[in-house]
Image (cartoon, rainbow, N blue to C red):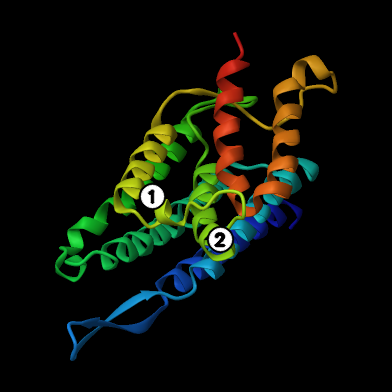
């Protein structure tokens, strides 16, 4: 029974990811007035912020399942595969649904947005596909214990999940709302995040081999950046920390 406890955490991760997708799909109807008399109705995202919160909650549980598995010495091949399947949903499909809705919003803002083909929204799901590929490769690679090849799917998922929260809560230092509802910016984000996941860039794992400052300097710097950014930038801290993580990993990559 003890060996199933980590799997229960993993299934909770999956459950939260499914709820995130449900909220990302919820819409409300608003009216756009064309000319003086005609009004056209269409749907826009209603609860993307709630979906984002569930993705962040899934990330917490995802961390706990690995921690509990090591604590109880209950790691298993089944748990490894189940974890990957859950991560695809929570940090691949759910964030892709957020991107899908943000792309819809970006097109709706345009004068001819309602005439846009639905195929223009399909690139949002490239993120889920790239994440699935990255997880499959990770499961076959035994060299990624203290470092990653490519951005882990939870990091990519949390980056995307932060977008609705940034839009909802805003930021007094810098306003990026126009960027996050611009289709070209979103397409670039999709391409860049997908490439980062399937790439073989050497990135650090947030595990401590020992307690020396020398060996953990980039992680300590990242923690400081995270704390300062969280205080000053609110949810905009997530993209800042994501970028800092990649830069620090490349600057301090293991020889």
User: Which residue in the protein does label 2 denote?
Assistant: 165
User: Which residue in the protein does label 1 denote?
Assistant: 128
Does residue 25 appear left or right of residue 66 in this picture? left
| Residue that appears at 62% across and 63% down | 12
- Secondary structure, mark 1, is helix
Determine the residue located farthest toward the bottom in the rendered image.
Answer: 37
- Secondary structure, mark 2, is helix
The answer to whether one can see residue 104 in this image is: yes
The x and y percentages for residue 192 are 38, 37
| Residue that appears at 34% across and 41% down | 188
How far apart are the alpha carbons under marks 2 and 1? Answer: 20 Å
The x and y percentages for residue 219 are 72, 28
Which quadrant: the N terminus? bottom right
Instruction: Compare marks 2 and 1 and give the one earlier in the sequence.
Output: 1
In-front residue for pair 40/139: 40
Q: Can you tell which quarter of the image residue 252 is in?
A: top right
Which quadrant: the C terminus? top right
């Amino acid at each position: 029974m003890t060996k199933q406890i980590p799997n229960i955490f993993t299934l909770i991760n999956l459950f939260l990811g499914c709820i995130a997708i449900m909220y990302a799909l919820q819409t409300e109807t608003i009216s756009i007035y064309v000319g003086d008399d005609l009004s056209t109705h269409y749907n826009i995202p209603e609860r993307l912020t709630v979906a984002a919160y569930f993705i962040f909650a899934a990330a917490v549980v995802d961390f706990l399942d690995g921690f509990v598995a090591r604590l109880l010495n209950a790691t298993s091949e089944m748990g490894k595969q189940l974890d990957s399947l859950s991560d695809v949903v929570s940090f691949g499909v759910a964030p892709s649904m957020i991107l899908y809705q943000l792309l819809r919003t970006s097109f709706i803002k345009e004068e001819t947005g309602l005439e846009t083909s639905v195929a223009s929204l399909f690139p949002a799901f490239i993120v889920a596909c790239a994440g699935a590929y990255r997880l499959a490769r990770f499961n076959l690679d035994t060299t990624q214990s203290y470092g990653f090849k490519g951005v882990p799917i939870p990091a990519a998922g949390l980056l995307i999940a932060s977008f609705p929260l940034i839009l909802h809560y805003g930021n007094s230092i810098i306003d990026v709302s126009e960027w996050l509802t611009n289709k070209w910016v979103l397409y670039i984000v999709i391409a860049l995040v997908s490439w980062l996941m399937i790439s073989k860039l050497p990135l650090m794992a947030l595990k401590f081999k020992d307690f020396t400052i020398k060996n953990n300097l980039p992680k300590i710097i990242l923690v400081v950046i995270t704390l300062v950014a969280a205080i000053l930038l609110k949810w905009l801290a997530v993209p800042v920390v994501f970028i800092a993580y990649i830069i620090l990993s490349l600057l301090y990559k293991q020889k």
